[in-house]
Structure formats: C-alpha cells, structure tokens
Amino acid sequence: QTNAQNLSASLHTSAAVLSRADVTNATTLTLTFDKTLGGSIATGDVTVLVNGAAKTPGAAAISSNTVLLSGFAANTFAS
C-alpha cells in the first residue's frame, strides 16, 4: 500500500522564451531560447512568415536551447 502523504512531485510548467534569432547565409535561421528544449522537431512542424509569405525549412533540429532551421530557398532572409 502506497502512502500518498510521502509522495511529492515538482512540475516545471513555464514555457521557454525566445531570446535571440539569427540568420546565416540568408538561408538558415537559428532560434535561441532561455531554457533547454526537449523533444524533437520536424520540418512540417515549422512555418516561418517572411514578409507575409509562409516558408518551410528543408531541415530542422533541436540542440540544447537552440532550434536550427535550415535549407530555406536561396536568399529567403536576404534584406
């Protein structure tokens, strides 16, 4: 028999906050968050609006507190 009074749990429920977004070579977007991210990401999970037009990356990955979105068409983020 389990004594529920002796059990405790701690839930971390605050969402990660975007702290930085960087573009490299006008085709790669790196998003940095204030917390380590868990799970995985697929290219279909992401849509980026560029001047109102929806763009989907060719590749997406999570590493620690960073999301790397790459493989956009040439000059997608060119200014």
Image: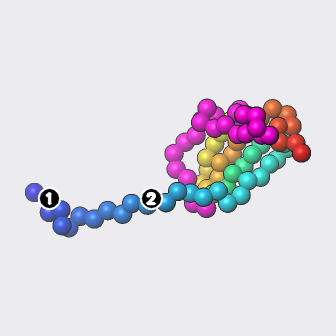
61 vs 47, nearest the viewer: 47
The residue at 59%/36% (across/down) is 45
Q: Earlier in the sequence, mark 1 or mark 2?
A: 1
* Dominant SS type (magenta): loop
Mark 1, secondary structure of its residue: loop
Report, in whole angstroms, how far the alpha carbon at label 1 lies from the one at label 2.
26 Å
Q: On the rendered structure, is 66 left or right of 71?
A: left
The quadrant in which the N terminus is found is bottom left
Does the magenta portion include 46? Answer: yes
Pointer 2 residue: 13
Specify start and end residues of the magenta stretch as a single range. 34-58
The quadrant in which the C terminus is found is top right
At label 2, which amino acid type do we have?
A: Thr
Residue 75 quadrant: top right
In the image, residue 26 lies at what x, y percent? 84, 42
Furthest-front residue in view? Answer: 52
Residue 4 quadrant: bottom left
Q: On the rendered structure, is 4 left or right of 11?
A: left
The residue at 60%/54% (across/down) is 64
The residue at 61%/32% (across/down) is 44
Residue 2 circle label: 1
